[in-house]
Amino acid sequence: MTHHHSVDRMWRSTNGVTFSFLPENETDARSVIAGLIPFIKEMHSQWFLQFFSEEAKLCHATSKWDVKTRSAYSAEEAESDGFFSGG
């Protein structure tokens, strides 16, 4: 399965980007975009984090990337899931 996407600098912006993807990849693409910082922390070099604002990094400071579900989750969600599942 081939995933087609692009990440481009926004027109006349010094720090904005535009994510483009094929409609059939929307669910997966939105999941990865929403969890991009945890995804990078888990799967790639920390070097890439320099391109995110401090606010964005702080927002995801406790977020983790779940490789199986290909989505991000917060520490609070992990605690809640563990509590409700008896873990």
Image (spheres, helix red, strand yellow):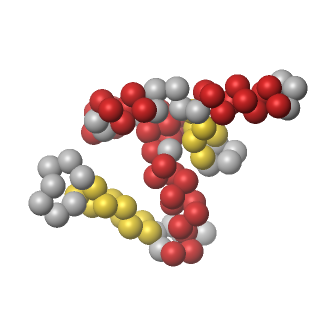
Q: Residue furthest bottom?
A: 23
Q: How many numbered tags mark residues here?
A: 0
In this picture, is 86 found above or below 14?
above
Q: In the depicted view, which residue is nearer to us: 38 or 44? A: 38
Residue 80, image quadrant: top right
Which percent across, then down, holds residue 15? 20, 48
- Is 22 positioned to the left or the right of 12 in the image? right
Let me know if residue 59 appears in the view. Answer: yes
Which percent across, then down, holds residue 39? 50, 41
Q: Residue at x 60, y 46 (%)?
A: 71
Quarter of the figure with the N terminus: bottom right
Q: Residue furthest right?
A: 86
Let me know if residue 44 appears in the view. Answer: no
Q: Residue at x 70, y 25 (%)?
A: 79
Quarter of the figure with the C terminus: top right
Residue 83, image quadrant: top right
Q: Residue at x 53, y 67 (%)?
A: 26
In this picture, is 18 found above or below 65?
below
Which percent across, then down, holds residue 24? 56, 74
- Is 43 positioned to the left or the right of 76 in the image? left
Which percent across, then down, holds residue 66? 64, 40
Q: In the depicted view, which residue is nearer to us: 74 or 38? A: 74
Q: Residue at x 82, y 31 (%)?
A: 84
- Is 84 positioned to the left or the right of 14 in the image? right
In this picture, is 10 found above or below 40?
below
